[in-house]
Amino acid sequence: MTGRKLSFISIIFALWSSAALGISINTSVDTQQLELGSQLTLTITIDGEGSSIPDPTLPDLSDFDVYSSGRNQSISMTNGRFQSTVEMNYILTPKKTGILIIGPVIIKDKKIMASSEPIKIVVSLAGQAGKIPQSRQGKARGESPQKTEDFFIEQTVDKKNPYIGEQITLTFRFYRAANLWDGPSMEWPKYVGFVVEDLPPQTQNYRVVNGKRYHVTEIKRALFPISTGEAVIETPTLTINPDPFGAMRDPFSMFGRGSKRSSPKVLTARSIRLNVRALPQKGRPDYFNGAVGRYNIKIGIDKDSVGVDEPITMKITLYGTGNIKSLPSVDIPDLPDFRVYESGRQESVNNSGGVVSGSIVFEQAIIPVTSGEFTVPALKYSYFDPGKNSYVTIAAEPINIIASGEGLTDVGGAPKNIIAAGKKSFGYIITEFPGEEEYFDLFGSPWFWILQITPVFGIAGSVLFRKHYIKLMGDRAYARRFGAGRRSKRIFKSAARRKKTGDYPGFYAEIYDFIVGFIADRLNLGKSALTLDDIRSDERIDQTVRLDLIAFLEKCQTARFAPFFNDENHADQLLNEASDLSGRLEKLL
């Protein structure tokens, strides 16, 4: 019997077993013919016996951009037996034209195997030149939205030809002329080639475009280009669920919305291309280190009179506007009469007012090696000011220091000031001995043996603890996995307290950090560098869980900056989702 026949028989047997055990899986789409740039909804329905159903394995969907749009589960009891139904919805946006295949969705768990039928999708080019597809609605390069559009997004920048390191203010706007069924889900691009800072607060206003009144949500971000040449600001992605009743209504109206939910839509905007200029060579000082912005400098020391070999803490502070976190340090000239050590760096950033500003403190320890009066010369710092289109040099005042004494000299391997002179040690001779005491049977006492055995257990415990400690110190992944649960519980409790006090933005930030930190600890990844795209592409996480995870994190990001999510019901829903996701992740990772 050939291998192909054996494989076919195995699949037939597996499907028969799944039918016997009451597992069935069906997939459907809302359309099989669409234009490039449009979208379709893929619905996966799984029915099975029992209170839980294994997660399915999705097919290869690399020909589509995939967005999770919800998961629902219901459990019923019939004739004393549980019956579960799980429905999962995904938004698919094709990346190319032609015939695309959505392969079978498979459930495989021990002896159970179920599979759906593949689905053929036909994708064609847009039927009209210049038409903006509904899933890519957006206003860019001066284009105005069509009057029929109820929702669209746009992104603009305040300059197209910035210098490297200069702040670019990016403004994102979400226009809506109708109600949403629930909160939108935002996914920012990676911004390759830029350092990014948020510029709160988010603002709300109304605008009239083409005679139509829109409610506009506006978010600003500061971008600092880090390389010259052409740079592209990619589009953000906003997933929305329009209210099927359409028009804007009074939110306190007595009439409900009904139970029908519309299909999600994915909105994007045009990408923005920048020409990032190099800093000019003309007028560039020799000691210029690359700072761009507008700054001042000051210097201070904790004392100006010390003994030789005693340290002085010198603090050099740069403050002003620009990319504070990336400011290069101040060059200190050679100080032959001092030993100089770097002892720390502190940053303080303020993003209010639409401009990134703040201060950075460089700490240095300077130690005089000889006695006398010395002067630390004025420290110079140069930066490029894009507003003036020129280089600016600033300087701090010189510092005078007096050092006295001889310092610490090594004598026989030890500093002389700690060697005591003329000190003698005395020994005492014992001349009196205690008399005989009453005999005590030590070996017959149970406490004797308890005390003998206790050190053995103590040593064994110490060995185990030392192994555990060495592994914690040497195996970073083990240490993070070991502490993940405890840290997650602490953050989870903190989020619940924030919700109870009404601090909803802080609550959404806490549960976002809770999930991202949990993933980072379990996978031994850097939390600060972990992005949604990294999670989406990490195959160590089951694809179904990944999609639900991305949808949850996007909800948190959107809710954090959207005031209309500040209600207890929405917060409770996200809290339950966070608990469910952490449980699923703990089983997988």
Image (cartoon, rainbow, N blue to C red):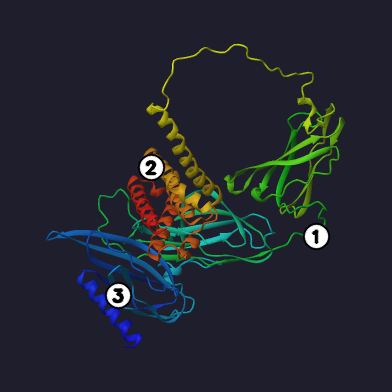
Instruction: Give the mark nearer the N terminus: 2 vs 1.
Output: 1
Q: What residue type is disc 3 on? A: Ser
Instruction: Give the mark nearer the N terminus: 3 vs 1.
Output: 3
Q: Nearer the viewer, mark 3 or mark 1?
A: 3
- Image quarter for residue 159? bottom right
- Determine if residue 361 is in view: no
Residue at x 67%, y 15% (from the top left corner): 428
Residue 550, percent from left and from top? 43, 60
What separation in Å lies between label 2 and label 1 (alpha carbons)?
A: 55 Å
Task: Please name the residue that numbered disc 3 is placed on.
Answer: 116
Mark 2 surroundings: few (<14), some (14-19) or many (≥20) residues within 10 A: some
- Determine if residue 48 is in view: yes
- Image quarter for residue 116? bottom left
Element type at marker 1? loop
Q: Nearer the viewer, mark 2 or mark 1?
A: 2
* Tally of marks: 3
Residue 72, percent from left and from top? 29, 60
State the mark number for residue 496. 2
Nearer to us in this view, 351 or 336: 336
Q: Is residue 232 left or right of residue 165?
A: left
Q: What residue type is disc 1 on? A: Gln
Q: From what the image shows, is residue 584 above or below residue 337?
A: below
Task: Please name the residue that numbered disc 1 is placed on.
Answer: 281
Instruction: Give the mark nearer the N terminus: 2 vs 3.
Output: 3
State the mark number for residue 139. none
Residue at x 25%, y 54% (from the top left corner): 256
What separation in Å lies between label 3 and label 1 (alpha carbons)?
A: 65 Å
Element type at marker 2? helix
Mark 1 surroundings: few (<14), some (14-19) or many (≥20) residues within 10 A: few
